[in-house]
Image (cartoon, rainbow, N blue to C red):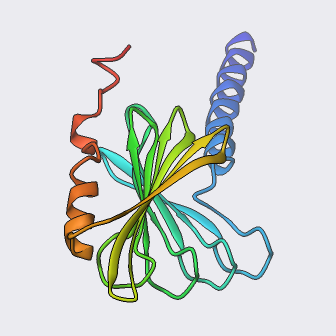
Amino acid sequence: MDSYLINMKVIQILLFFTLSISVLADEIPRYWDFNADGKEDIWYEYSELSYLLNLDRNYDGVVDLHTQYDSHTDWPLSGASDDDFDGSFETRHAYKNGTIYAYLVDSNQDQCYDIVHYYHHEVIFKSKRYENSKGKKIITVVNYKLDFPVSSDIKETSLTPCEFHKSEVSKIPSSQDMPTKESNP
């Protein structure tokens, strides 16, 4: 009788352990449907080195923001968004050491970023905008303090839109330069 009770106890413990793991696995969803329309509004795609967060912010069933994260540190590596919901990802999110470094925007869909917002400790401190207005090529630089514009400067330039793009993109840190969990305990 004692061996029967011991075996039943072992079976109960194993069953509890197995069910607990199953329940825990179910509690970590791969997607969420916030507006109950049957379409995923947030979902993840996983790989060995990183995972991708996909977001449908306007609930039309189409991804309009995605962010790639490092699987080891959970730091964001890069992202892109379709902020006008026209199906084109015009905004790139650049990160450095897990925090936002810059947003680069292609506002006129010419495949060259013409607006760049720079951040320090996730607070905007400078924006640059390239414009070709009435035949004049200008770059407007706006400086911020506590998220509020405090000064601006407008200068004429000889740069083309894509030269401005290249000059600003060259300042963006590569996600390859990010420290890993092993190098930054």
Asked if residue 73 is positioned above or below residue 150 in the image, the reply reads above
Residue located 72% across and 28% down the image: 12
The percent position of residue 151, horizontal first and vertical second, equals 57, 47
Left or right: residue 43 versus residue 141 is: right
Name the residue rendered at 49%, 86% in the picture.
87
Task: Name the side, left or right, on which 18 lies relative to 63.
Answer: right
The image position of residue 24, as x and y in percent, is 66, 41
Q: What residue sits 76% from the left and 82% below the top?
A: 37
Please tell me in which quadrant of the rendered image residue 176 appears: top left
User: How many circles with numbers are drawn on the protein?
Assistant: 0
Question: In the rendered image, is residue 73 in sight?
Answer: yes
Give x and y (percent) for residue 142.
52, 53
Task: State which quadrant residue 60 falls in.
Answer: bottom right
Q: The N terminus lies in which quarter of the figure?
A: top right
Q: Is residue 179 above or below residue 158?
A: above
Can residue 70 be seen here? The reply is: no
- Which quadrant does the C terminus fall into? top left
Lateral position of residue 63 relative to residue 12, left or right: left
Q: Residue at x 77, y 68 (%)?
A: 34
Q: Nearer the viewer, residue 153 or 160?
A: 153
From this viewpoint, which residue is outermost toward the right? Answer: 36
Whole-percent x and y of residue 134? 40, 89
Question: Who is closer to the viewer here, 168 or 58?
Answer: 168
